[in-house]
Image (cartoon, grey):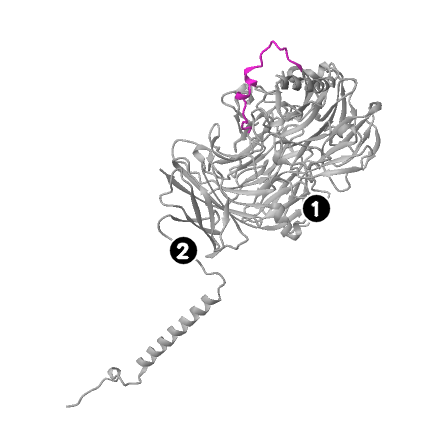
């Protein structure tokens, strides 16, 4: 009894200290979840958010690059202002005094702007090329914290932008903030929150908080972070379509949000939230969802109202979304899907009304067959047993699998059908092959295999394309300084490769032995999928305006095949891959609608996927026709 | 009476048959000497390919390696044992620098070995994984990964545990 009394007496000051730093608004963090409405930025894409001292939020968008001020009631404070030319792809924003902001751009530019979007000053930041992903105040409000995707680092800068300290060991540090003297980093590659005291510790991902999964405390692609009253941490749990609230002790205390059941619906449902901010004056949380081009505001839930059953974690799981990259077995029946959400690849029999998944392989991790963000995928042509090559971004490797599938009667799942054949560590291989040497490790995106057996994989970190043979031996590299900047898609094209570049908006055709690639103007701003049709035409998807286009065989202006943001029969929403079979059937990954669109050689249009996302007019059959 | 004596039948004859026999004997002797010489020049003796109870021969995915894997026959249920073997490349044991990983699992039940095992290379060039335990009856998928520098290639086989 005496001990208990002593404990209570001792804990008194601690408890009062714990409470005194927070306001009533901040105490409501564990009850957040009531949707207060949305702000649309369409067609602009919101990419960064911060709260303002006097209430409300500042949001940065790209395409076009603008600064939006949203007041406490969720209204636009004024017309959005255009950002300086140096900030075309903003990645972070933090408020300064006098209504100014510190901003950082994907290109590595760091500086101060005023409320009118005018450039005030440039800060140096790290000396070597870097790719910022997030910006926050340093511990104790001193200086700045920035993350670098290129080298997997975190930097502490002083108020003048000079690097004071740097830490390595991250895969994809996508979010950062300080709670007290500790630094917290969300790492998309580890699916963890890595916290460390910069004065005494080095970051250690193995002892970090969370892992890949959907249960409370687990994470799937954690992105933006935000601290509240040095007690709570809000995490954009992107691929779980929710925001999780962690205590500073590292325990998940609360979450809100769940995947939208109906296309574009908000009302508290979230779709790939990437950044979060907390308005301390009103207790309102702002969550940005780039995929929906919107900001959703959340307040405290009515404690009397029960949480919808669908949001109970037992009902939540990581689900297939038809992935981000596709591969067709040309002339065959298989479709291979690379699904970063669930860290796996799946193989489907595709010539059915709804493709049937025969097997999948993966899971999060670095062991063989596992992935840390699978990206590009393609079938290896000309093998007796179908083979797939997959780029594994976080592990910086390629993995080759064999799929000995044969039609044997009723369609059924066949566990362990997909077999690992081989893998190669590209970071290690690059050290052995002189023409692959680079200052930063490769960051793998799209991938394609040619008829001649060459495997081409895009290295986003070094703006180049690595070439390997079927046994994963290095055989060459495509480089085009100034022309190739951000390859988002690649496909085999006869003796060469077609590459879509999202930054320049161009298509490039590389051929071994030619120093300069052929440039193909698209007239689009962001090609994200490309393939050559057997008739010689080039088909590509434009992620910026949700369209599928076709360049005629002889060249010339691209004609629009499908366009318009929506779930309609001839509409798309953030399309990605386009793959064309040898019979001329065009397969389009309509990623934002979680569905596939197939245009047959005779122009018939077919959709497959989740029923709510199928064209309303043809729900159930999903069939139509391209004019 | 005239007696004909066939020259080929005359034991004391120096005819061509005798020469051929001598040449064959000499070439056999030379061949034997050469064989011993070549065998003596080799640094590592090629292990005699073991066969018989408990031995399995598995080719890796691309055929680069031949894995000779030994498990107790029959492999016991719920008892620890040592899985061992050799990995050959082009008929020769792989270098000491190569890393070998043995593992097992039941894909139909979505689990692996209850206790992960560590695979070590033996001084004789082989490998072994101690403490392997099949904790459930049914089909187990066994994998042997061979890592040389940045490259890894997998061999796999199924076993039925009763």
Q: Regarding mark 1 in the picture, which secondary structure is present there?
A: loop
Label 1: few (<14), some or many (≥20) within 10 Å?
few
Query: Which quadrant of the figure contains the C terminus of chain A?
Result: top right
Question: Residue at 41% across / 41% down in the picture?
Answer: B158
Dot 2 corresponds to which residue? B49
State how many labels appear: 2
Name the mark nearer the viewer: 1 or 2: 2
Q: Regarding mark 2 in the picture, which secondary structure is present there?
A: loop
Residue A60 included in the magenta stretch of the image: no
Left or right of B143, for residue A549: right
- The range drawn in magenta is A299-321
Left or right of A526, for residue A346: left
In the image, residue B101 lies at what x, y percent?
Answer: 50, 45
Secondary structure mostly seen in the magenta stretch: loop
Q: Which mark is residue A95?
A: none
Whether labels 1 and 2 share one chain = no
In the image, residue A39 lies at what x, y percent?
Answer: 70, 18
Query: Which quadrant of the figure contains the N terminus of chain A?
Result: top right
Q: Nearer the viewer, residue A13 or B102?
A: A13
Spatial separation of the CA atoms under disc 1 and disc 2: 46 Å
């Amino acid at each position: 009894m005496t001990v208990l009394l002593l404990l209570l007496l001792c804990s008194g000051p601690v408890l009062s200290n714990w409470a005194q730093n927070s306001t009533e608004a901040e105490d409501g963090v564990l009850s957040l979840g009531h949707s207060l409405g949305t702000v649309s930025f369409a067609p602009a894409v919101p990419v960064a958010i911060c709260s303002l001292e006097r209430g409300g939020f500042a949001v940065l968008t790209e395409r076009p690059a603008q600064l939006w001020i949203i007041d406490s009631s969720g209204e636009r404070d004024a017309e959005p202002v255009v950002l300086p030319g140096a900030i075309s792809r903003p990645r972070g924003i933090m408020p300064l005094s006098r209504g100014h902001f510190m901003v950082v751009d994907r290109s590595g530019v760091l500086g101060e702007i005023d409320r009118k979007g005018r450039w005030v000053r440039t800060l140096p930041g790290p000396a070597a090329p870097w790719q910022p992903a997030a910006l926050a105040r340093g511990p104790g409000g001193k200086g700045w914290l920035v993350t670098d995707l290129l080298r997997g680092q975190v930097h502490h800068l002083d108020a003048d932008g000079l690097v004071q300290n740097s830490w390595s060991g991250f895969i994809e540090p996508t979010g950062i903030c300080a709670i007290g003297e500790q630094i917290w980093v969300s790492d998309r590659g580890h699916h963890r929150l890595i916290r460390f005291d910069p004065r005494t510790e080095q970051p250690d991902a193995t002892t970090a908080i969370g892992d890949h999964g959907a249960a409370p405390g687990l994470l799937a692609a954690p992105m933006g972070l935000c601290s509240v009253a040095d007690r709570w941490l809000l995490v954009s749990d992107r691929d779980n379509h929710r925001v999780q609230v962690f205590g500073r002790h590292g325990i998940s205390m609360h979450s809100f949000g769940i995947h939208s059941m109906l296309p574009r619906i908000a009302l508290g449902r979230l779709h790939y939230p990437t950044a979060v901010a907390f308005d301390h004056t009103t207790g309102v949380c702002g969550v940005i969802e780039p995929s929906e081009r919107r900001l959703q505001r959340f307040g405290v839930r009515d404690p009397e109202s029960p949480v919808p059953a669908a949001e109970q974690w037992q009902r939540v799981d990581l689900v297939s979304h038809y992935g981000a990259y596709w591969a067709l077995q040309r002339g065959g029946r298989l479709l291979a899907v690379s699904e970063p959400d669930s860290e796996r690849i799946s193989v489907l029999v595709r010539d059915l009304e709804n493709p049937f998944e025969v097997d999948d392989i993966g899971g999060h991790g670095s062991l063989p067959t596992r992935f840390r963000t699978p990206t590009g995928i393609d079938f290896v042509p000309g093998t007796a047993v179908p083979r797939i090559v997959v780029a594994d971004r976080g592990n910086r490797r390629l993995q080759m699998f064999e799929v000995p599938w044969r039609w044997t009667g009723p369609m059924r799942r066949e566990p362990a059908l997909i077999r690992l054949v081989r893998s190669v560590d590209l970071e290690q291989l690059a050290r052995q092959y002189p023409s692959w040497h680079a200052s930063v490790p490769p960051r793998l995106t799209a991938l394609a295999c040619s008829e001649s057996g060459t495997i081409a994989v895009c290295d986003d970190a070094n703006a180049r394309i690595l070439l390997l043979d079927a046994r994963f031996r290095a055989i060459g590299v495509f480089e085009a300084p100034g022309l190739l900047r951000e390859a988002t898609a690649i496909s085999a094209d006869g003796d060469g490769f077609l590459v879509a570049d999202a930054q320049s908006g161009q298509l490039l055709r590389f051929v071994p032995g030619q120093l300069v690639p052929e440039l193909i103007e698209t007239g689009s701003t962001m090609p994200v999928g490309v393939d050559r049709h057997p008739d010689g035409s080039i088909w590509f998807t434009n992620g910026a305006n949700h369209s599928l286009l076709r360049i005629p065989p002889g060249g010339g202006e691209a004609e629009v095949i499908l366009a318009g943001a929506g779930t309609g029969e001839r509409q798309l929403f953030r399309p990605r891959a386009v793959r064309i079979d040898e019979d001329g059937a065009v397969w389009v990954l309509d990623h934002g609608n979680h569905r596939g669109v197939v245009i047959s050689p005779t122009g018939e249009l077919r959709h497959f996927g989740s029923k709510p996302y199928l064209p309303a007019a043809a729900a159930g059959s999903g069939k139509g026709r391209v004019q | 009476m005239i007696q004909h004596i066939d020259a080929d039948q005359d034991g004391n004859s120096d005819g061509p048959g005798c020469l051929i026999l001598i040449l064959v004997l000499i070439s056999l002797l030379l061949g034997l000497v050469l064989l011993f010489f070549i065998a003596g020049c080799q640094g590592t003796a090629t292990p005699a390919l073991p066969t018989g109870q408990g031995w399995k021969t598995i080719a890796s995915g691309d055929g680069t390696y031949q894995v000779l894997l030994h498990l107790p026959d029959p492999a016991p249920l719920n008892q620890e044992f040592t899985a061992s073997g050799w990995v050959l490349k082009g008929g020769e044991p792989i270098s000491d620098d190569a890393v070998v990983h043995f593992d097992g699992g039941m894909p139909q039940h979505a689990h692996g070995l209850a206790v992960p095992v560590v695979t070590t290379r033996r001084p004789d060039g082989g490998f072994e994984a101690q403490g392997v335990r099949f904790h459930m009856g049914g089909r187990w998928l066994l994998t042997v990964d061979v890592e040389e520098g940045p490259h890894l290639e997998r061999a796999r086989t199924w076993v039925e545990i009763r």
